[in-house]
Image (cartoon, rainbow, N blue to C red):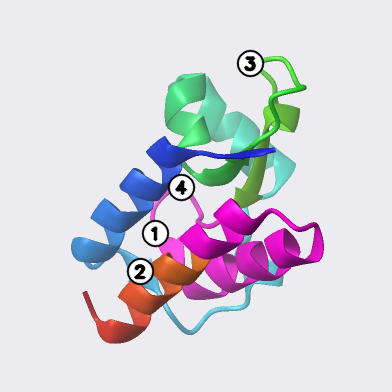
Amino acid sequence: MKLNQAAVKHAKKLIKDGKVAKDTDWSDDQPSADEENKFLDNHDWDTYGQWYLGIDTDENEETKGRHNFPYGDFKKVHRDGIIAAKQRAAQYDYADIEKAADELLEMIDSGQ
């Protein structure tokens, strides 16, 4: 598993543009498989991947299994999605993903 730098860059831009959902429930707001498929119907894999902080390099490039640690709903960054990604990264000892999620969380909380 490696950090998806394109996703971090995309998330930072969204945060700077104010496209953040702060008071939501990630268990309800995380995109469903159907929502992911609909997004993929209209976007390429690179654009899809920008919404996931982790890349599983053992998976084929054009598969959902390659993309891990979602942080948004294809429209906004979700604060609780970042928290979930950070916690899961810490649980599996993906320090670079955990650190990136922490930086994104700090950006959100400081109002950047």
* Residue that badge 4 annotates: 74
Q: Which residues are magenta?
A: 71-100
Residue farthest right in this picture: 92
Kindly report which numbered mark, 1 or 3, lies closer to the viewer in this rendering.
3
* Residue that badge 1 annotates: 76
Q: Is 14 situated above or below 109? A: above
**Of helix, strand and loop, which mostly describes the magenta segment?**
helix
Q: Is 104 situated above or below 73? A: below
Q: Can residue 83 be found in the magenta stretch?
A: yes
* Residue that badge 2 annotates: 20
Q: Earlier in the sequence, mark 2 or mark 4?
A: 2
> Dot 3 lies on which element?
loop
- Amino acid carrying mark 1 in the image: Lys
Residue at 28 percent across and 84 percent down: it is 110
Q: What is the distance, in whole Å, between disc 2 and disc 1 at their CAs?
A: 5 Å
Q: Earlier in the sequence, mark 2 or mark 1?
A: 2
Q: Nearer the viewer, residue 28 or 59?
A: 59
- The picture places residue 39, in percent across and down from the top left corner, at 52, 33
> Dot 2 lies on which element?
strand
> Dot 4 lies on which element?
loop
| Residue 15 position by quadrant | bottom left
Q: What is the distance, in whole Å, between disc 3 and disc 2 at their CAs?
A: 27 Å
- The picture places residue 45, in percent across and down from the top left corner, at 51, 21
- Amino acid carrying mark 4 in the image: Phe
Q: Nearer the viewer, residue 98 or 111?
A: 98
Q: Earlier in the sequence, mark 3 or mark 4?
A: 3
Image quadrant occupied by the C terminus: bottom left
Q: Earlier in the sequence, mark 3 or mark 2?
A: 2
- The picture places residue 7, in percent across and down from the top left corner, at 43, 43
* Residue that badge 3 annotates: 62
Q: Are marks 2 and 1 in contact (CB under 8 Å)?
A: yes
